[in-house]
Image (spheres, coloured by chain):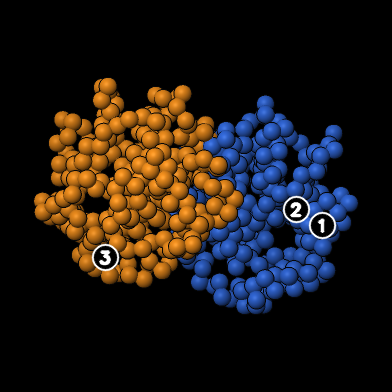
Chain colours: A blue, B orange
Amino acid sequence: MTRTLYALAGADRARHFSPHVWKVALSLAHKGLDFETAPVGFTEIPAIEGGATKTVPLLRDGDRLIVDSFAIALYLEETYPDRPSLFGGEGGKALCRFVESWSQTVLHTALVRFVVLDIHDCLGPEDQAYFRTSREARFGKSLEAVVEAGGGEIETFAAKLEPLRALLGKQAYFGGETPCFADYIVFGPLQWARIVSPKVVLADGDPVKDWFERCLDLHGGVGRSVTSA
Amino acid sequence: MTRTLYALAGADRARHFSPHVWKVALSLAHKGLDFETAPVGFTEIPAIEGGATKTVPLLRDGDRLIVDSFAIALYLEETYPDRPSLFGGEGGKALCRFVESWSQTVLHTALVRFVVLDIHDCLGPEDQAYFRTSREARFGKSLEAVVEAGGGEIETFAAKLEPLRALLGKQAYFGGETPCFADYIVFGPLQWARIVSPKVVLADGDPVKDWFERCLDLHGGVGRSVTSA
């Protein structure tokens, strides 16, 4: 059986960086499921698997194709119930949606302003043109202006992590003593920043950095299979 | 069997307002467990139940005494497993801790700056003196200065709720289609503000307000047993 995770990469195909793909990579590793990573550029996505998706992650699991990181995690939980649980029951599934909402509205929106130009710079020429046009339309300004306007935010980013820092005073992971899908949800955007940008977003001594390093070590260190920028 | 929830109240003993007590009141109602509310003032807490606690909520359940809202929710889940679940499994318990951390670090810290003087004003004379002294020491300034310094925050409070607003685009409650303890964790501080302060903290038309109104209606409208300020 072939299990393939389509993953967003830049000019260097060995360095896949999508936060949403990383959520799935760690989820597959959590379940102990082997998979191959198939790197694709932004502009190649519409052509993969006969036009199955406009976005990655896309997982091929035998004859099944599943799109969207949360949908893939639910699929893995249902399809491989005897492997370690990603959610710890129905309550965990419902509350992972809150962690996803927090991560998307607080972390992604802040981090994208730091790293959007770094992402651009790591892409091949065709993807660079697509990325600049689509993102500048979304932000309503040049990528350079986005990064410049976000300049002060790196100092306030640590404050945005305070809810996670407070949690880590009580337990080692979102999942308690061991990680769950919520850990991978929040790992994703921090891994994205680690891979595409040399900017430091987590300070030494911050319990959030310690947690992130523990996540990088999980499941044989799959998170370290791509080095930091 | 006597089940008593010790609840913080001001000069009007019928208006208990502690956010942490409200989490437990809704949790007891969620489990369908009858209870009596025993109102106490700040300075009376050390004397209740032979000095069992320095803080409320304190729950007496027959011959058991349990302190702390999260500990009480865990106790209820373990003791009444055949009643509707508050957590939906171990994953839900672990992630409720994150919701608690988010609520404490983001919502409580903002709301206390709006309502601290309103709390003071609803207390009896002895509790007013205790409250002013202890809180002014904690904030390092007068209660009036705390409220004045927090003046601009009511406009930014809506932004702090964005993770919950995004969640409510996907599902009706933290718990999914039905509420769980995480809903009561976040209901608590908003109910606290509703009861002690005439300030409007949730705007009409905000999905968070709609969710809060749904929470007020739950379990026979227990949340509406105390009217708004």
Q: Which residue is mark 3?
A: B146
Q: Is residue A144 visible?
A: no
Identity of the residue drawn at 62% across and 36% down: A86
**Circle 1: element type:** helix
Q: Residues within 10 Å of mark 1 (few under 14, many from 20)?
A: many
Q: Which residue is mark 1?
A: A45
Give the residue drawn at x 38%, y 67%: B153
Q: In the shown orientation, is residue B62 left or right of residue A54?
A: left
Q: Are marks 2 and 1 in contact (CB under 8 Å)?
A: yes
Compare marks 2 and 1 and give the one earlier in the sequence. Answer: 1
Where is residue B2 drawn, in percent x and y?
25, 25
Q: Position of residue B114 (x, y in %)?
A: 31, 62
Q: Residue at x 67, y 26 (%)?
A: A82
Q: Nearer the viewer, residue B194 or A53?
A: B194
Which residue is outermost to the right?
Answer: A50
Residue under numbered circle 2:
A56
Q: Confirm whether circles 3 and 2 share one chain.
A: no
